[in-house]
Image (spheres, rainbow, N blue to C red):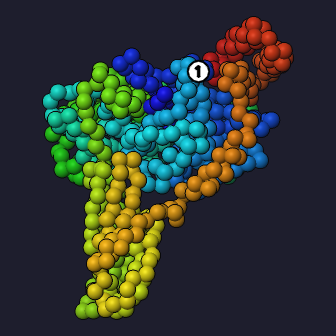
Amino acid sequence: MIIGIDLGTTNSLAAVWRDGKAQLIPNALGSFLTPSCVGMDDDGTVLTGEAARARLQTHPHMTAALFKRYMGSERETQLGARKFRPEELSSMVLRSLKEDAEAWLGEPVTEAIVTVPAYFSDAQRKATRVAGQLAGLRVERLLNEPTAAALAYGIQDTKRETKFLVFDLGGGTFDVSILELFEGVMEVRATAGDNFLGGEDFVSVLVDAFLSRSGLSRDLNGAELNGTQRQRLREEAERAKRALSDSLTARMAYTSAGKEYSLDLTEDLFVLLCDHLVQRLRGPVERALRDATIKASELDSVVLAGGATRMPLVRKMVSRMFGRFPSINLDPDQAIALGAAVQTGLMARDAALSEVVMTDVAPYSLGISIAREIGPNQYEGGHYLPIIERNSTVPVSRVESITTINDYQNELVVHVYQGESRRVSDNVFLGKLAFPIEAKRSGEVSADVRFTYDISGVLEAEITLQPSLEKHTLVITENAGVMTQAEVAKRLAELNELKIHPRDKIENRTLLAQADRLYEQLLGQERAYLAQHIAAFTGVLNTQQPAAMRRAHEVLTRVMRELGGSSFL
Ligand code: AMP
Protein backbone atom coordinates (compact mmCIF):
# COMPACT_ATOMS: atom_id res chain seq x y z
CA MET A 1 0.00 0.00 0.00
CA ILE A 2 1.21 3.48 -0.80
CA ILE A 3 0.32 6.67 1.09
CA GLY A 4 1.02 10.37 0.68
CA ILE A 5 2.87 12.12 3.49
CA ASP A 6 3.30 15.80 4.25
CA LEU A 7 6.38 15.81 6.47
CA GLY A 8 6.02 19.31 7.89
CA THR A 9 8.16 21.49 10.13
CA THR A 10 5.52 21.68 12.85
CA ASN A 11 2.99 19.03 11.88
CA SER A 12 2.90 16.02 9.63
CA LEU A 13 -0.08 14.36 7.97
CA ALA A 14 -0.76 11.21 6.00
CA ALA A 15 -3.41 10.66 3.36
CA VAL A 16 -4.43 7.91 1.01
CA TRP A 17 -6.16 7.68 -2.35
CA ARG A 18 -9.19 5.47 -1.76
CA ASP A 19 -12.61 5.10 -3.36
CA GLY A 20 -11.73 7.65 -5.99
CA LYS A 21 -10.74 10.41 -3.59
CA ALA A 22 -7.99 11.62 -1.28
CA GLN A 23 -8.67 10.88 2.39
CA LEU A 24 -6.74 12.02 5.44
CA ILE A 25 -5.63 9.34 7.89
CA PRO A 26 -6.26 9.94 11.61
CA ASN A 27 -3.52 9.14 14.11
CA ALA A 28 -3.91 7.08 17.30
CA LEU A 29 -5.46 10.12 19.00
CA GLY A 30 -8.02 10.59 16.22
CA SER A 31 -6.34 13.73 14.90
CA PHE A 32 -5.11 14.38 11.34
CA LEU A 33 -2.22 16.53 12.51
CA THR A 34 0.68 14.73 14.15
CA PRO A 35 3.14 17.21 15.67
CA SER A 36 6.61 16.72 14.16
CA CYS A 37 8.10 16.21 17.61
CA VAL A 38 10.17 13.42 19.07
CA GLY A 39 10.97 12.90 22.71
CA MET A 40 12.60 10.46 25.05
CA ASP A 41 10.55 9.27 28.01
CA ASP A 42 12.16 8.99 31.43
CA ASP A 43 12.77 5.27 30.86
CA GLY A 44 14.41 5.83 27.46
CA THR A 45 11.32 5.02 25.39
CA VAL A 46 10.78 7.09 22.26
CA LEU A 47 7.64 9.23 22.14
CA THR A 48 6.42 10.94 18.99
CA GLY A 49 3.66 13.33 18.03
CA GLU A 50 1.39 14.98 20.57
CA ALA A 51 2.88 13.07 23.53
CA ALA A 52 6.30 14.51 22.67
CA ARG A 53 4.94 17.98 21.93
CA ALA A 54 3.24 18.15 25.31
CA ARG A 55 6.64 17.48 26.90
CA LEU A 56 8.45 20.24 24.98
CA GLN A 57 7.77 22.54 27.90
CA THR A 58 8.19 20.14 30.80
CA HIS A 59 11.20 18.28 29.35
CA PRO A 60 12.88 20.59 26.81
CA HIS A 61 16.18 18.68 26.92
CA MET A 62 14.48 15.39 26.17
CA THR A 63 12.34 16.64 23.29
CA ALA A 64 13.12 17.71 19.73
CA ALA A 65 11.04 19.86 17.36
CA LEU A 66 11.56 21.91 14.17
CA PHE A 67 14.21 19.44 12.95
CA LYS A 68 13.03 19.72 9.34
CA ARG A 69 15.00 22.96 9.30
CA TYR A 70 18.21 20.98 9.73
CA MET A 71 17.55 18.28 7.18
CA GLY A 72 20.57 17.91 4.96
CA SER A 73 22.94 19.08 7.68
CA GLU A 74 25.07 17.19 10.18
CA ARG A 75 23.48 18.91 13.16
CA GLU A 76 22.64 16.42 15.89
CA THR A 77 20.19 16.73 18.76
CA GLN A 78 20.90 15.18 22.13
CA LEU A 79 17.95 13.30 23.61
CA GLY A 80 18.83 11.49 26.80
CA ALA A 81 21.93 9.41 26.26
CA ARG A 82 21.91 9.56 22.47
CA LYS A 83 22.40 12.03 19.69
CA PHE A 84 20.12 11.98 16.66
CA ARG A 85 20.52 13.36 13.18
CA PRO A 86 17.58 15.26 11.64
CA GLU A 87 16.80 12.36 9.30
CA GLU A 88 16.58 9.99 12.27
CA LEU A 89 14.16 12.27 14.09
CA SER A 90 12.11 12.64 10.90
CA SER A 91 12.12 8.87 10.48
CA MET A 92 10.47 8.46 13.87
CA VAL A 93 7.65 10.80 12.81
CA LEU A 94 7.32 8.89 9.52
CA ARG A 95 7.27 5.60 11.41
CA SER A 96 4.39 6.73 13.60
CA LEU A 97 2.43 7.95 10.54
CA LYS A 98 3.08 4.59 8.88
CA GLU A 99 1.79 2.72 11.95
CA ASP A 100 -1.28 4.94 12.18
CA ALA A 101 -1.98 4.35 8.50
CA GLU A 102 -1.56 0.60 8.88
CA ALA A 103 -3.94 0.54 11.83
CA TRP A 104 -6.52 2.62 9.94
CA LEU A 105 -6.22 0.86 6.61
CA GLY A 106 -5.80 -2.61 8.05
CA GLU A 107 -2.93 -3.48 5.74
CA PRO A 108 0.82 -2.97 5.61
CA VAL A 109 2.09 0.32 4.21
CA THR A 110 5.44 -0.05 2.52
CA GLU A 111 5.67 2.91 0.18
CA ALA A 112 5.08 6.62 0.36
CA ILE A 113 5.19 9.80 -1.63
CA VAL A 114 6.73 12.37 0.67
CA THR A 115 6.43 16.09 0.03
CA VAL A 116 9.35 18.51 0.34
CA PRO A 117 9.59 22.28 -0.08
CA ALA A 118 10.25 23.02 -3.74
CA TYR A 119 13.24 25.00 -2.57
CA PHE A 120 14.89 22.00 -0.84
CA SER A 121 18.43 21.40 -2.01
CA ASP A 122 19.88 18.15 -3.22
CA ALA A 123 21.23 17.29 0.26
CA GLN A 124 17.88 18.05 1.91
CA ARG A 125 16.06 15.84 -0.59
CA LYS A 126 18.48 12.99 -0.06
CA ALA A 127 18.11 13.32 3.71
CA THR A 128 14.32 13.07 3.29
CA ARG A 129 14.70 9.87 1.29
CA VAL A 130 16.98 8.46 4.00
CA ALA A 131 14.39 9.36 6.66
CA GLY A 132 11.87 7.26 4.72
CA GLN A 133 14.32 4.39 4.48
CA LEU A 134 15.01 4.53 8.24
CA ALA A 135 11.24 4.37 8.83
CA GLY A 136 10.89 1.25 6.68
CA LEU A 137 9.20 3.14 3.84
CA ARG A 138 10.27 3.12 0.24
CA VAL A 139 10.02 6.71 -0.88
CA GLU A 140 8.47 6.21 -4.27
CA ARG A 141 8.83 9.87 -5.09
CA LEU A 142 9.52 13.23 -3.53
CA LEU A 143 6.83 15.70 -4.52
CA ASN A 144 7.25 19.45 -4.27
CA GLU A 145 4.83 20.85 -1.71
CA PRO A 146 3.33 23.56 -3.95
CA THR A 147 2.72 21.01 -6.68
CA ALA A 148 0.93 18.88 -4.10
CA ALA A 149 -1.20 21.86 -3.02
CA ALA A 150 -2.17 22.49 -6.65
CA LEU A 151 -3.21 18.84 -7.04
CA ALA A 152 -5.35 19.08 -3.91
CA TYR A 153 -7.21 22.05 -5.38
CA GLY A 154 -7.96 19.90 -8.43
CA ILE A 155 -6.24 22.35 -10.71
CA GLN A 156 -5.42 19.37 -12.92
CA ASP A 157 -9.15 19.04 -13.63
CA THR A 158 -9.34 22.53 -15.07
CA LYS A 159 -10.15 21.96 -18.66
CA ARG A 160 -8.65 25.14 -19.96
CA GLU A 161 -5.14 26.48 -19.89
CA THR A 162 -4.40 28.07 -16.55
CA LYS A 163 -1.52 29.80 -14.80
CA PHE A 164 -1.47 30.01 -11.04
CA LEU A 165 0.73 30.73 -8.07
CA VAL A 166 1.01 28.61 -4.93
CA PHE A 167 1.83 30.61 -1.82
CA ASP A 168 2.85 28.18 0.90
CA LEU A 169 3.78 29.48 4.33
CA GLY A 170 4.26 26.64 6.80
CA GLY A 171 5.73 26.54 10.28
CA GLY A 172 9.31 27.01 9.16
CA THR A 173 9.50 27.35 5.40
CA PHE A 174 8.11 29.61 2.74
CA ASP A 175 7.66 28.47 -0.85
CA VAL A 176 6.30 30.21 -3.89
CA SER A 177 5.70 28.32 -7.10
CA ILE A 178 4.24 29.35 -10.38
CA LEU A 179 2.60 26.54 -12.24
CA GLU A 180 0.98 26.30 -15.61
CA LEU A 181 -1.49 23.73 -16.80
CA PHE A 182 -1.57 23.37 -20.54
CA GLU A 183 -3.08 20.50 -22.53
CA GLY A 184 -2.88 18.08 -19.60
CA VAL A 185 0.67 18.98 -18.65
CA MET A 186 1.19 20.68 -15.29
CA GLU A 187 4.45 22.52 -15.51
CA VAL A 188 6.21 24.24 -12.64
CA ARG A 189 7.41 27.41 -14.32
CA ALA A 190 9.41 28.74 -11.39
CA THR A 191 9.96 28.27 -7.70
CA ALA A 192 11.49 30.51 -5.10
CA GLY A 193 11.40 30.57 -1.35
CA ASP A 194 13.04 30.93 1.98
CA ASN A 195 13.92 27.89 4.07
CA PHE A 196 14.09 30.00 7.20
CA LEU A 197 10.80 31.86 7.16
CA GLY A 198 7.54 30.55 8.57
CA GLY A 199 4.84 30.78 11.22
CA GLU A 200 7.41 30.14 13.97
CA ASP A 201 9.09 33.45 13.18
CA PHE A 202 5.84 35.28 13.91
CA VAL A 203 5.79 33.53 17.28
CA SER A 204 9.36 34.67 17.96
CA VAL A 205 8.32 38.25 17.21
CA LEU A 206 5.54 38.01 19.80
CA VAL A 207 7.91 36.49 22.38
CA ASP A 208 10.38 39.36 21.89
CA ALA A 209 7.62 41.97 21.98
CA PHE A 210 6.29 40.46 25.19
CA LEU A 211 9.71 40.45 26.84
CA SER A 212 10.35 44.08 26.05
CA ARG A 213 6.84 45.55 26.39
CA SER A 214 5.47 43.69 29.44
CA GLY A 215 8.35 44.70 31.71
CA LEU A 216 9.51 41.09 32.05
CA SER A 217 12.83 41.77 30.37
CA ARG A 218 13.54 44.67 32.73
CA ASP A 219 12.74 42.54 35.78
CA LEU A 220 14.90 39.70 34.54
CA ASN A 221 17.71 42.24 34.57
CA GLY A 222 19.98 40.50 32.10
CA ALA A 223 19.09 36.96 33.23
CA GLU A 224 17.70 34.61 30.57
CA LEU A 225 14.59 32.48 30.77
CA ASN A 226 15.44 28.81 31.06
CA GLY A 227 14.31 26.28 28.43
CA THR A 228 11.06 25.43 30.20
CA GLN A 229 10.10 29.05 30.83
CA ARG A 230 10.96 30.08 27.28
CA GLN A 231 8.87 27.25 25.89
CA ARG A 232 5.94 28.28 28.11
CA LEU A 233 6.18 31.82 26.79
CA ARG A 234 6.38 30.54 23.20
CA GLU A 235 3.20 28.54 23.72
CA GLU A 236 1.47 31.63 25.05
CA ALA A 237 2.66 33.54 21.98
CA GLU A 238 1.46 30.74 19.68
CA ARG A 239 -1.96 30.85 21.33
CA ALA A 240 -2.16 34.64 20.94
CA LYS A 241 -1.05 34.43 17.30
CA ARG A 242 -3.85 31.98 16.52
CA ALA A 243 -6.37 34.06 18.47
CA LEU A 244 -5.47 37.02 16.25
CA SER A 245 -6.54 34.95 13.23
CA ASP A 246 -10.09 34.93 14.59
CA SER A 247 -10.40 38.23 16.44
CA LEU A 248 -8.96 41.72 16.40
CA THR A 249 -7.40 41.56 19.85
CA ALA A 250 -5.62 39.03 22.03
CA ARG A 251 -3.92 39.11 25.39
CA MET A 252 -0.69 37.39 26.33
CA ALA A 253 -0.14 36.64 30.00
CA TYR A 254 2.78 35.06 31.79
CA THR A 255 3.70 34.58 35.43
CA SER A 256 7.30 34.77 36.52
CA ALA A 257 8.58 34.70 40.11
CA GLY A 258 5.01 35.12 41.35
CA LYS A 259 4.43 38.27 39.31
CA GLU A 260 1.88 38.48 36.50
CA TYR A 261 2.97 40.07 33.21
CA SER A 262 0.70 40.77 30.29
CA LEU A 263 0.57 42.33 26.86
CA ASP A 264 -2.56 43.40 25.00
CA LEU A 265 -2.24 42.80 21.29
CA THR A 266 -4.28 44.32 18.53
CA GLU A 267 -4.25 43.38 14.90
CA ASP A 268 -2.60 46.72 14.10
CA LEU A 269 0.18 46.16 16.61
CA PHE A 270 0.75 42.65 15.26
CA VAL A 271 0.99 44.05 11.72
CA LEU A 272 3.48 46.65 12.90
CA LEU A 273 5.63 44.13 14.79
CA CYS A 274 5.70 41.68 11.88
CA ASP A 275 6.22 44.18 9.11
CA HIS A 276 9.79 42.99 8.41
CA LEU A 277 8.57 39.38 8.07
CA VAL A 278 5.74 40.37 5.73
CA GLN A 279 8.22 42.35 3.64
CA ARG A 280 10.41 39.24 3.40
CA LEU A 281 7.49 37.39 1.81
CA ARG A 282 7.62 39.73 -1.18
CA GLY A 283 11.12 38.88 -2.44
CA PRO A 284 10.50 35.23 -3.38
CA VAL A 285 7.14 36.14 -4.99
CA GLU A 286 8.82 38.76 -7.17
CA ARG A 287 11.67 36.44 -8.08
CA ALA A 288 9.34 33.60 -9.05
CA LEU A 289 7.28 35.94 -11.25
CA ARG A 290 10.44 37.25 -12.90
CA ASP A 291 11.89 33.77 -13.50
CA ALA A 292 8.60 32.58 -14.97
CA THR A 293 8.33 35.77 -17.05
CA ILE A 294 4.76 36.18 -15.89
CA LYS A 295 3.08 39.33 -14.61
CA ALA A 296 0.97 39.11 -11.47
CA SER A 297 -2.04 40.21 -13.53
CA GLU A 298 -1.65 37.21 -15.86
CA LEU A 299 -2.21 34.68 -13.06
CA ASP A 300 -5.59 32.97 -13.06
CA SER A 301 -5.51 32.12 -9.37
CA VAL A 302 -3.47 32.21 -6.20
CA VAL A 303 -3.60 29.10 -4.02
CA LEU A 304 -2.77 29.24 -0.30
CA ALA A 305 -1.16 26.40 1.60
CA GLY A 306 0.46 26.07 5.03
CA GLY A 307 -1.13 26.83 8.40
CA ALA A 308 0.50 30.25 8.66
CA THR A 309 -1.57 31.55 5.70
CA ARG A 310 -4.48 31.60 8.15
CA MET A 311 -3.08 34.84 9.52
CA PRO A 312 -5.20 37.73 8.21
CA LEU A 313 -2.12 39.90 7.76
CA VAL A 314 -0.69 37.33 5.34
CA ARG A 315 -3.98 37.03 3.44
CA LYS A 316 -4.24 40.80 3.19
CA MET A 317 -0.70 41.06 1.87
CA VAL A 318 -1.45 38.38 -0.74
CA SER A 319 -4.69 40.10 -1.80
CA ARG A 320 -2.93 43.44 -2.10
CA MET A 321 0.00 42.05 -4.00
CA PHE A 322 -2.12 40.20 -6.56
CA GLY A 323 -5.15 42.44 -6.63
CA ARG A 324 -7.46 39.49 -5.96
CA PHE A 325 -8.53 37.19 -3.14
CA PRO A 326 -6.70 33.86 -2.89
CA SER A 327 -8.44 30.46 -3.22
CA ILE A 328 -9.16 29.19 0.24
CA ASN A 329 -11.75 26.46 0.01
CA LEU A 330 -9.42 23.84 1.51
CA ASP A 331 -7.92 23.71 4.95
CA PRO A 332 -4.42 25.09 4.35
CA ASP A 333 -2.96 22.58 6.83
CA GLN A 334 -4.33 19.66 4.86
CA ALA A 335 -3.86 20.66 1.23
CA ILE A 336 -0.36 19.25 0.82
CA ALA A 337 -1.07 15.82 2.30
CA LEU A 338 -4.25 15.55 0.23
CA GLY A 339 -2.27 16.50 -2.86
CA ALA A 340 0.33 13.82 -2.11
CA ALA A 341 -2.51 11.28 -1.97
CA VAL A 342 -3.84 12.58 -5.31
CA GLN A 343 -0.37 11.96 -6.71
CA THR A 344 -0.46 8.32 -5.54
CA GLY A 345 -3.80 8.06 -7.33
CA LEU A 346 -2.32 9.57 -10.48
CA MET A 347 0.49 7.07 -10.36
CA ALA A 348 -1.98 4.23 -10.07
CA ARG A 349 -3.86 5.78 -13.03
CA ASP A 350 -7.08 5.95 -11.10
CA ALA A 351 -10.06 6.32 -13.43
CA ALA A 352 -11.51 9.18 -11.36
CA LEU A 353 -8.58 11.40 -12.20
CA SER A 354 -8.13 13.10 -15.49
CA GLU A 355 -4.88 12.26 -17.16
CA VAL A 356 -2.27 14.80 -16.19
CA VAL A 357 1.46 14.82 -16.66
CA MET A 358 3.43 16.53 -13.95
CA THR A 359 6.57 18.44 -14.46
CA ASP A 360 8.76 20.16 -11.93
CA VAL A 361 11.76 22.43 -12.08
CA ALA A 362 15.29 22.32 -10.72
CA PRO A 363 15.20 24.74 -7.77
CA TYR A 364 18.84 25.86 -8.11
CA SER A 365 21.33 26.22 -10.93
CA LEU A 366 23.84 23.38 -11.06
CA GLY A 367 27.25 23.75 -12.60
CA ILE A 368 30.98 23.32 -12.36
CA SER A 369 34.05 25.35 -11.53
CA ILE A 370 36.11 26.58 -14.47
CA ALA A 371 38.97 28.97 -15.14
CA ARG A 372 38.20 32.03 -17.25
CA GLU A 373 40.62 33.98 -19.36
CA ILE A 374 41.18 37.35 -17.66
CA GLY A 375 43.89 38.54 -20.05
CA PRO A 376 46.06 37.17 -22.86
CA ASN A 377 47.01 33.67 -21.74
CA GLN A 378 46.07 34.55 -18.20
CA TYR A 379 43.49 32.41 -16.44
CA GLU A 380 41.72 32.70 -13.14
CA GLY A 381 40.11 29.68 -11.49
CA GLY A 382 37.01 29.49 -9.32
CA HIS A 383 34.51 30.82 -11.86
CA TYR A 384 31.09 29.22 -12.14
CA LEU A 385 29.82 27.60 -15.31
CA PRO A 386 26.11 26.79 -14.82
CA ILE A 387 25.11 23.68 -16.77
CA ILE A 388 21.50 23.31 -15.66
CA GLU A 389 19.98 26.72 -14.99
CA ARG A 390 17.56 27.19 -12.11
CA ASN A 391 13.91 26.69 -12.96
CA SER A 392 14.67 24.38 -15.90
CA THR A 393 11.86 21.86 -16.25
CA VAL A 394 12.92 18.43 -14.95
CA PRO A 395 13.82 15.77 -15.87
CA VAL A 396 16.51 17.70 -17.64
CA SER A 397 19.81 16.81 -19.21
CA ARG A 398 22.29 19.44 -20.43
CA VAL A 399 25.80 19.27 -21.69
CA GLU A 400 28.70 21.75 -21.81
CA SER A 401 32.17 21.23 -23.27
CA ILE A 402 35.36 22.09 -21.44
CA THR A 403 38.99 21.95 -22.52
CA THR A 404 42.29 21.78 -20.68
CA ILE A 405 44.11 25.06 -20.01
CA ASN A 406 47.52 23.78 -18.95
CA ASP A 407 50.09 22.14 -21.18
CA TYR A 408 50.62 18.47 -20.37
CA GLN A 409 48.19 18.36 -17.50
CA ASN A 410 47.63 14.69 -16.74
CA GLU A 411 44.55 14.90 -14.58
CA LEU A 412 41.13 16.44 -15.01
CA VAL A 413 39.31 17.55 -11.88
CA VAL A 414 35.67 18.59 -12.09
CA HIS A 415 34.06 20.28 -9.09
CA VAL A 416 30.26 20.33 -9.00
CA TYR A 417 28.37 23.20 -7.37
CA GLN A 418 24.83 24.33 -6.78
CA GLY A 419 23.88 28.00 -6.60
CA GLU A 420 23.62 31.25 -8.47
CA SER A 421 26.86 33.12 -7.70
CA ARG A 422 29.48 33.98 -10.30
CA ARG A 423 32.27 32.69 -8.05
CA VAL A 424 32.02 29.05 -6.95
CA SER A 425 33.25 29.92 -3.46
CA ASP A 426 29.82 31.51 -2.86
CA ASN A 427 27.95 28.42 -4.07
CA VAL A 428 27.36 25.07 -2.39
CA PHE A 429 29.94 22.41 -3.19
CA LEU A 430 28.29 19.09 -4.08
CA GLY A 431 31.15 16.84 -5.07
CA LYS A 432 34.11 16.32 -7.33
CA LEU A 433 35.37 13.90 -9.91
CA ALA A 434 39.07 13.47 -10.70
CA PHE A 435 40.61 11.13 -13.27
CA PRO A 436 43.82 10.82 -15.32
CA ILE A 437 43.93 12.14 -18.87
CA GLU A 438 46.46 11.90 -21.63
CA ALA A 439 49.11 14.62 -21.20
CA LYS A 440 48.80 16.91 -24.22
CA ARG A 441 49.13 20.59 -25.00
CA SER A 442 46.50 22.90 -23.56
CA GLY A 443 43.25 22.86 -25.44
CA GLU A 444 43.96 19.48 -27.03
CA VAL A 445 41.98 17.47 -24.51
CA SER A 446 38.30 18.27 -24.23
CA ALA A 447 35.41 16.72 -22.38
CA ASP A 448 31.64 16.89 -22.46
CA VAL A 449 30.13 17.41 -19.02
CA ARG A 450 26.57 16.16 -18.97
CA PHE A 451 24.32 16.90 -16.00
CA THR A 452 21.10 14.95 -15.61
CA TYR A 453 18.64 16.05 -12.97
CA ASP A 454 15.73 13.69 -12.40
CA ILE A 455 12.17 14.19 -11.25
CA SER A 456 13.10 13.56 -7.59
CA GLY A 457 15.85 16.16 -7.64
CA VAL A 458 18.77 13.76 -7.89
CA LEU A 459 21.77 14.91 -9.91
CA GLU A 460 24.10 12.77 -11.96
CA ALA A 461 27.18 14.17 -13.69
CA GLU A 462 28.72 12.24 -16.56
CA ILE A 463 31.95 13.29 -18.19
CA THR A 464 32.88 11.99 -21.63
CA LEU A 465 36.44 12.57 -22.81
CA GLN A 466 36.92 13.47 -26.47
CA PRO A 467 37.78 11.83 -28.73
CA SER A 468 38.24 8.58 -26.74
CA LEU A 469 34.63 8.66 -25.47
CA GLU A 470 35.91 7.35 -22.15
CA LYS A 471 33.19 8.03 -19.54
CA HIS A 472 33.30 8.93 -15.85
CA THR A 473 30.19 9.22 -13.73
CA LEU A 474 30.04 11.23 -10.57
CA VAL A 475 28.74 9.64 -7.40
CA ILE A 476 28.44 12.51 -4.97
CA THR A 477 29.76 11.11 -1.72
CA GLU A 478 31.18 14.28 -0.21
CA ASN A 479 27.79 15.89 -0.13
CA ALA A 480 27.79 17.66 3.22
CA GLY A 481 25.00 16.44 5.43
CA VAL A 482 24.20 13.30 3.47
CA MET A 483 24.76 9.92 5.06
CA THR A 484 26.43 7.13 3.15
CA GLN A 485 24.48 3.88 2.75
CA ALA A 486 26.84 2.22 5.27
CA GLU A 487 26.02 4.92 7.80
CA VAL A 488 22.31 4.54 7.07
CA ALA A 489 22.54 0.80 7.74
CA LYS A 490 24.35 1.43 11.02
CA ARG A 491 21.84 4.06 12.16
CA LEU A 492 18.96 1.78 11.18
CA ALA A 493 20.34 -0.99 13.37
CA GLU A 494 20.69 1.47 16.25
CA LEU A 495 17.20 2.82 15.78
CA ASN A 496 15.80 -0.69 15.78
CA GLU A 497 17.23 -1.16 19.23
CA LEU A 498 15.35 1.78 20.66
CA LYS A 499 12.20 1.10 22.57
CA ILE A 500 9.27 2.85 20.94
CA HIS A 501 6.20 3.64 22.93
CA PRO A 502 3.47 1.19 21.83
CA ARG A 503 0.83 2.83 19.65
CA ASP A 504 -2.11 1.44 21.61
CA LYS A 505 -0.82 3.08 24.79
CA ILE A 506 -0.03 6.44 23.27
CA GLU A 507 -3.37 7.97 24.16
CA ASN A 508 -2.82 7.51 27.88
CA ARG A 509 0.82 8.55 27.65
CA THR A 510 -0.20 11.74 25.86
CA LEU A 511 -2.78 12.58 28.51
CA LEU A 512 -0.17 12.09 31.21
CA ALA A 513 2.24 14.44 29.43
CA GLN A 514 -0.53 17.02 29.03
CA ALA A 515 -1.47 16.70 32.70
CA ASP A 516 2.17 17.18 33.71
CA ARG A 517 2.25 20.33 31.64
CA LEU A 518 -0.90 21.66 33.31
CA TYR A 519 0.52 20.75 36.73
CA GLU A 520 3.43 23.14 36.11
CA GLN A 521 0.99 25.96 35.47
CA LEU A 522 -1.12 25.52 38.58
CA LEU A 523 -0.48 26.47 42.16
CA GLY A 524 -1.82 25.63 45.60
CA GLN A 525 -4.95 23.55 46.00
CA GLU A 526 -5.60 23.20 42.31
CA ARG A 527 -2.12 21.81 41.85
CA ALA A 528 -2.57 19.33 44.71
CA TYR A 529 -5.98 18.30 43.34
CA LEU A 530 -4.48 17.58 39.92
CA ALA A 531 -1.51 15.74 41.46
CA GLN A 532 -3.91 13.46 43.29
CA HIS A 533 -5.74 12.65 40.06
CA ILE A 534 -2.53 12.09 38.10
CA ALA A 535 -1.39 9.65 40.77
CA ALA A 536 -4.71 7.83 40.63
CA PHE A 537 -4.52 7.68 36.83
CA THR A 538 -1.01 6.19 36.83
CA GLY A 539 -2.15 3.70 39.46
CA VAL A 540 -4.95 2.47 37.18
CA LEU A 541 -2.58 2.33 34.19
CA ASN A 542 -0.43 -0.10 36.13
CA THR A 543 -3.38 -2.48 36.49
CA GLN A 544 -3.56 -2.82 32.68
CA GLN A 545 -7.33 -3.28 32.85
CA PRO A 546 -8.84 -1.73 29.69
CA ALA A 547 -12.25 -0.76 31.08
CA ALA A 548 -10.76 0.81 34.23
CA MET A 549 -8.15 2.60 32.13
CA ARG A 550 -10.81 4.06 29.86
CA ARG A 551 -12.76 5.34 32.86
CA ALA A 552 -9.64 6.79 34.48
CA HIS A 553 -8.82 8.54 31.18
CA GLU A 554 -12.25 10.15 31.17
CA VAL A 555 -11.95 11.23 34.80
CA LEU A 556 -8.55 12.86 34.35
CA THR A 557 -9.71 14.60 31.16
CA ARG A 558 -12.71 16.00 33.04
CA VAL A 559 -10.57 17.16 35.94
CA MET A 560 -8.20 18.93 33.55
CA ARG A 561 -11.13 20.71 31.90
CA GLU A 562 -12.49 21.72 35.33
CA LEU A 563 -9.14 23.26 36.11
CA GLY A 564 -9.28 25.35 32.94
CA GLY A 565 -6.80 23.19 31.07
CA SER A 566 -8.84 22.59 27.89
CA SER A 567 -6.13 24.16 25.77
CA PHE A 568 -3.71 21.54 27.11
CA LEU A 569 -5.79 18.66 25.78
P1 AMP B 1 2.16 23.81 8.66
O1 AMP B 1 3.65 23.62 8.66
O2 AMP B 1 1.57 24.00 7.34
O3 AMP B 1 1.43 22.80 9.52
O4 AMP B 1 1.92 25.22 9.38
C1 AMP B 1 2.09 25.35 10.73
C2 AMP B 1 2.12 26.82 11.06
O5 AMP B 1 0.82 27.38 10.89
C3 AMP B 1 2.52 27.06 12.50
O6 AMP B 1 3.46 28.12 12.58
C4 AMP B 1 1.20 27.46 13.14
O7 AMP B 1 1.40 28.34 14.22
C5 AMP B 1 0.49 28.15 12.01
N1 AMP B 1 -0.96 28.18 12.22
C6 AMP B 1 -1.82 27.14 12.33
N2 AMP B 1 -3.07 27.57 12.58
C7 AMP B 1 -3.02 28.92 12.64
C8 AMP B 1 -3.98 29.97 12.88
N3 AMP B 1 -5.27 29.69 13.12
N4 AMP B 1 -3.53 31.25 12.86
C9 AMP B 1 -2.23 31.55 12.64
N5 AMP B 1 -1.28 30.61 12.40
C10 AMP B 1 -1.66 29.32 12.41
Residue 59 visible in this rendered orientation of the protein? no
| Vertical order, 318 against 367 (above or below) | above
Q: In terms of secondary structure, where does tag 1 sit? A: helix
Spot occupied by residue 49 in the image (x, y as percentages of width and height): 61, 31
Q: How many marks?
A: 1
Spot occupied by residue 117 in the image (x, y as percentages of width and height): 41, 44
In the picture of the structure, the residue carrying the numbered disc 1 is 103
Quarter holding residue 379: bottom left
Quarter holding residue 502: top right
| Vertical order, 408 against 383 (above or below) | below
Q: Residue at x 43, y 65 (%)?
A: 474
Spot occupied by residue 186 in the image (x, y as percentages of width and height): 24, 38
Q: Residue at x 65, y 46 (%)?
A: 492
Residue 17 visible in this rendered orientation of the protein? yes
Q: Amino acid at mark 1?
A: Ala
Q: Nearer the viewer, residue 160 or 330?
A: 160
| Vertical order, 237 against 89 (above or below) | above
